[in-house]
Amino acid sequence: MLPDERGLRPETVAIAAGAPRRGPGDPLNVAVTLSSTYHAGGPVGYARDGNPTWTAFEETLGALEGGTALVFASGAGAISAVLEELPVGAVVVAPGDAYTGTRAYLADAAARGRLGVRLVDVADTEATLRACAGAALLWIESPTNPLLAVADIGALVTGVAGGAVQVVVDNTFATPLGQRPLDAGADIVVHSATKLIAGHSDVLLGAVVTRDQALAQRLHDRRTVLGAVAGPLETYLALRGLRSLALRLDRASANAEGLAHRLADHPAVSRVRYPGLESDPGHARAAAQLRGFGTIVSFEVRAGAAAAQRVCERVRLITHATSLGGIETTLERRCSHPGEDWTPAELIRVSVGCEHVEDLWADLAQALEGEDAPA
Ligand SMILES: *Cc1c(COP(=O)(O)O)cnc(C)c1O
């Protein structure tokens, strides 16, 4: 049952889709089905092929993105399943600042001669479209990580239309409540459900969504043979998280906007990157394309990298940790990560959570204290 077909709004779909049959005495929630095998004669025989808890999650995410969803053990698992689809020698156009794991996959595939890779700035529509000549696949992230550049998804899809270029959008940062790339004409959406969808920093999970039924079947079959499939408990927890995504996203985005404005006015901060700021280069695009401006804010500490590191170590309420999309606020210097040394050393990426904004600001302000003077 896909409630969006009954005209329900996305906030409602997130809560109502994928629910079990309603009958007297029936449970409200899907069970965590722990079974490696099934009685013979049904649609699924073995757990690598399907699971009722997966189905509930997939129906809900599919209804939200407007396509057929497939759950994977992680975002990286979803991403590699999509890229494995490409024939040897195919050319992929991808953001130079794509997610580390995506870039690592592409670099490895290029080194082995399996794929050709062209890295571009996806916020530059003209340059991206030029790079797509002769390519098999365009990979888009928007907003990008951690610089929060905004790609014009509609213009990119239109620009490659009619050609043989498949368009994939990693929608982890925006979530289906922020933007629906399949509506804009993209062929595939991928998610790290580890982040905002699950939302509580307690599971690793991924998903692929597409409207192309033949492709969905191939990805389903590849998932079965690759075998790195999602755990039923992880899937249940991600579905539980997805039920409250709208509330978390509203609060976290409002907090992010509040913090971005205050950081922009702070003497220790030289630059804030957040598409919700009117001064941000991606603001107009984000306002047209996104619902809300997202939960990630990046800022640069004027006094440099060492000062930025001290700020990360001085926070008390906020957690100094990698990853993003949890209900709690975390921050880190991306450049301290393997493969992320290209990011500005004084840049701190904040994944804003759902605490009270005044408590978050008090913590950031105390961590920034004394860092006003350039080193
Ligand atoms: C974390 C992340 C991934 C990878 O997902 P995992 O669940 O960690 O495997 C992919 N894309 C983006 C944008 C991410 O933030």
Image (spheres, rainbow, N blue to C red):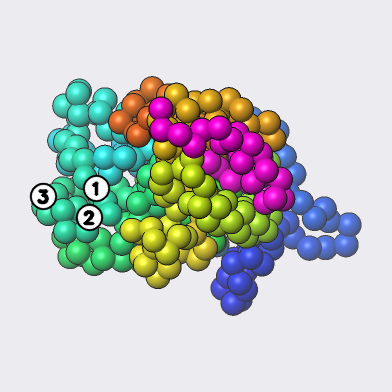
Relative side of 352 to 24, left or right: left
Q: Which residue is mark 3?
A: 134
Residue 174 % position (x, y): 48, 54
Q: Which residue is mark 2?
A: 124
Q: Residue at x 74, y 44 (%)?
A: 31
Type of residue at label 3? Gly
Residue 157 % position (x, y): 27, 62
Asked which quadrant contains residue 24, the reply is bottom right
Asked which quadrant contains residue 151, the reply is bottom left
Question: Magenta span covers which residues?
Answer: 347-375
Residue at disc 1, secondary structure: loop
Discs 1, 2 touching: Cβ within 8 Å: yes
Between disc 2 and disc 3, the foreground one is 2
Q: Residue at x 83, y 63 (%)?
A: 23
Q: Residue at x 50, y 66 (%)?
A: 291
* Camera-side residue of 174 and 86: 174
Discs 3, 1 touching: Cβ within 8 Å: no
Type of residue at label 2? Asp
Residue at mark 2 to residue at mark 3: CA–CA distance: 18 Å
Residue 348 among those drawn in magenta: yes
Residue at mark 1 to residue at mark 2: CA–CA distance: 6 Å
Label ID, residue 121: 1
Label ID, residue 139: none
Q: Is mark 1 within 8 Å of ligand 1?
A: no
